[in-house]
């Protein structure tokens, strides 16, 4: 051993985020000696800020249909073998109180710190969690991976890439995983920001006046639709419905918003029969926040009482309200993106083990891989499931 070199390990895991911590714990429990190397001063920083500090740690409904990937079937095997119920059982084993908020989203009652502590407690003594270890060079020598991190060298026959994606660079996130994958000849699906606010310009810029207004809507991009809240911001559109749809949106495309998702297109005609003296403005105010009702009514340009408006104009207004088209100018980028779409190509990996098909002993898990979940606990479920899949396959 040269000075600064650590004793040999069975596995080196790069990144003590959600996926890396889970993988280290499970590999350690199998008796493997593991070095878990983390660039930051403490593990699990994204877990700590997740879910508004309460960590939306899984989603009861998580299944392959809730994930985007160039290969939509890739996540199936790992998700089936480590389920949301398995993670809930772990949370309960550690006495962590939790609750279901909405749409199957499970949160800690207390703090996200409990999840990080739980994962650390799950690591047996055979796991060294080494912080302030910024991984630089990685090489392969004599069938072992040799990793240099902050002036020290680590060596093991298994290497797990768990360094996440580039979303939120101010937390130190970067494309390190992709550079490393490319170094070993693995393809990377072009990464782009996801679960990210959209920006508006042109005529739509007028909607920025509504900054702070939120309403339950149905948002669509192409054939995909989400019914949740949308929020107008000083840059454009955000809120859960928009974040969800951002993952499906491609630059230059339109986004549709149904402001009254439950109403049929002829609801204004029906109202004309019942309340001929009402206006579109007053009708909208019954269902939407005042400022939004005002803005939509002004843009529809029909100020008269409904009784004086021809049915065809009311039908056209109803159709517009059911599918208001916006053409976002872009997204707020990786700086504001909760996750990254794209990443290490699933074509390069075994869906059962997460091992690179052409580089035995090299694994990739979590957000670094081209598997991206919806908003609502799905991304952590992928981190747990892919971490477990790799941990069970690391050779001793
Ligand atoms: P993650 O990014 O967690 O970990 C990677 C680790 O690698 C980091 O600790 C990093 O410092 C380290 N690293 C990077 N480069 C390195 C290097 N060169 N050397 C050493 N270490 C290095 N999801 C969800 O399901 N529910 C939720 O509530 C939320 N909430 C949420 C809020 C916010 C603000 C964000 C930004 C994201 C979420 N997410 C989420 C998404 C979730 O945080 C994300 O999908 C997982 O953290 C991904 O886990 P990974 O372990 O793959 O990467």
Image (spheres, rainbow, N blue to C red):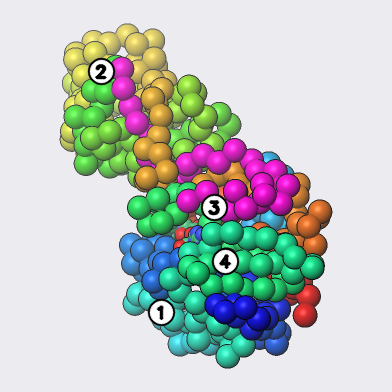
The stretch of residues the image draws in magenta is 174-202
Q: Which mark, residue 299? A: 2
Q: Nearer the viewer, mark 1 or mark 2?
A: 1
Circle 1 — which element?
A: helix
Q: What kind of element bears circle 2?
A: helix
Badge number at residue 148: 4
- Identify residue for label 1: 114
In the displayed structure image, the side of residue 85 where residue 321 appears, left or right = left
Q: Quadrant of the N terminus?
A: bottom right
Report the mark closest to the observer, 4 or 2: 4
Q: Mark 4, mark 1: which one is toward the viewer?
A: 4
Q: Earlier in the sequence, mark 4 or mark 1?
A: 1
Disc 3 and disc 4: Cα gap in Å? 14 Å
Q: Which residue: 69% across, 55% down?
A: 75
Q: Position of residue 114 (x, y in %)?
A: 41, 79
Residue hosting label 3? 176
Circles 4 and 2, Cβ within 8 Å, touching? The answer is no
Where residue 390 appears, x then y in whole percent?
70, 68
- Quick check: 227 above or below 234? below
Q: Is residue 282 magenta?
A: no
Q: Are marks 4 and 1 in contact (CB under 8 Å)?
A: no
């Amino acid at each position: 051993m040269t000075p600064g070199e650590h004793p040999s390990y069975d596995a080196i895991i790069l990144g003590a985020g959600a996926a890396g911590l889970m993988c280290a714990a499970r590999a350690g429990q199998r008796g493997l000696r593991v070095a878990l190397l983390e660039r930051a001063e403490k593990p699990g920083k994204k877990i700590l800020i997740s879910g508004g500090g309460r960590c939306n740690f899984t989603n009861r409904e998580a299944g392959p249909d809730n994930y985007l990937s160039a290969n939509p079937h890739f996540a199936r095997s790992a998700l089936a073998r480590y389920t949301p119920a398995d993670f809930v059982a772990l949370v309960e084993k550690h006495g962590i109180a939790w609750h279901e908020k909405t749409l199957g989203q499970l949160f800690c009652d207390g703090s996200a710190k409990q999840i990080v502590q739980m994962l650390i407690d799950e690591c047996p003594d055979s796991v060294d969690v080494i912080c302030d270890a910024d991984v630089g060079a990685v090489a392969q020598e004599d069938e072992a991976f040799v990793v240099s991190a902050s002036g020290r060298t680590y060596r093991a026959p298994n290497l797990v890439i768990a360094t996440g994606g580039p979303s939120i660079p101010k937390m130190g996130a970067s494309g390190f995983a992709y550079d490393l994958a490319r170094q070993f000849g693995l393809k990377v699906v072009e990464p782009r920001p996801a679960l990210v606010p959209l920006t508006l310009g042109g005529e739509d810029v007028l909607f920025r006046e509504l900054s702070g207004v939120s309403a339950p809507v149905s948002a669509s991009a192409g054939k995909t639709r989400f019914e949740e809240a949308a929020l107008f911001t000083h840059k454009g559109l955000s809120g859960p419905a928009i974040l969800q749809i951002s993952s499906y949106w491609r630059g230059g495309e339109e986004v549709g918003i149904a402001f009254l998702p439950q109403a049929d297109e002829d609801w204004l005609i029906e109202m004309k029969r019942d309340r001929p003296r009402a206006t579109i403005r007053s009708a909208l105010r019954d269902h939407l926040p005042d400022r939004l009702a005002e803005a939509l009514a002004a843009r529809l340009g029909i100020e008269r009482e409904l009784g004086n408006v021809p049915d065809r104009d009311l039908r056209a207004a109803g159709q517009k309200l059911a599918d208001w088209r916006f053409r976002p100018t872009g997204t707020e980028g990786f700086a504001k993106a909760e996750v990254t779409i794209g990443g290490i190509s699933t074509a390069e990996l075994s869906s059962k083990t997460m091992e690179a098909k052409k580089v035995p002993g090299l694994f990739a898990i979590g957000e670094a891989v081209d598997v991206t979940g919806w908003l609502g606990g799905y991304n952590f479920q992928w981190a747990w499931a892919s971490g477990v899949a790799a941990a069970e396959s690391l050779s001793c």
